[in-house]
Amino acid sequence: KNCALSDEDGVLKPLAPFGGKIFVIELSQIRARKDELRRDLSDYLGLDLPDMSPLSNKGYVFDEAIDICDGQYKDIRDVLLVHARRSSRWILDYFLQSPDVLVSSREYFVETLENWGKDPCDSRRKTLELTEEHVDYDW
């Protein structure tokens, strides 16, 4: 048994080493830090990895796709954000503190996880508002 619930806050915390090294990535690293990620993952695996450029998903249309930023999904988004905040706190405060857990671009990884609890729709709305302020409608 390597984990137990903390008596003080009910959080699941590692009690002992995991029994091996764990390499963790945040998906945005594949685009934002691909060269560092490739190098660090190559070192971790002891392999020479090929280019890790993500495939483009442009042009894909899904019939069942939703826009999570639509007002009708606000309640769902709020629940997801609560879980995202709790998950990022656990990863940063407990999981990442283990000497058995390795990450690439640690500073970027931490910064990204700290943003998990922020509603991405807020920044999208601000971008749209700024764009609309600078549009010249005088044709």
Image (cartoon, rainbow, N blue to C red):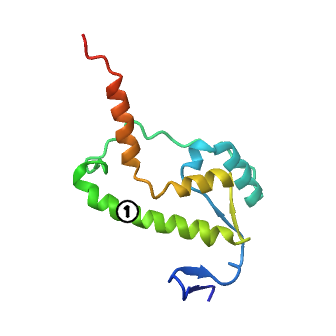
Against 5, residue 51 (above or below) is: above
As drawn, the residue found furthest toward the top would be: 139
The residue where tag 1 is placed is: 80
Q: Count numbered badges in the picture.
A: 1
* Residue 35 percent coordinates (x, y): 68, 43
Which element is circle 1 on?
helix
- Residue, x 52% and y 80% (percent of image)? 11
Snapshot quadrant of residue 47: bottom right
**Is residue 60 something that shows in the picture?**
no
Characterize the local packing of mark 1: few (<14), some (14-19) or many (20 or more) Cα atoms within 10 angstroms. some
User: Callout 1, which amino acid?
Assistant: Leu
* Residue 114 percent coordinates (x, y): 54, 57
Quadrant of the image containing the N terminus: bottom right
**Is residue 32 something that shows in the picture?**
yes
Quadrant of the image containing the C terminus: top left
Against 90, residue 121 (above or below) is: above
Residue 68 falls left or right of residue 3: left
- Residue, x 40% and y 52% (percent of image)? 119
As drawn, the residue found furthest toward the left would be: 72
Snapshot quadrant of residue 75: bottom left
Against 42, residue 1 (above or below) is: below
**Towards the viewer: 133 or 113:** 133
**Towards the viewer: 130 or 65:** 130
- Residue, x 40% and y 65% (percent of image)? 82
* Residue 107 percent coordinates (x, y): 66, 52
* Residue 13 percent coordinates (x, y): 59, 80
Residue 10 falls left or right of residue 32: left
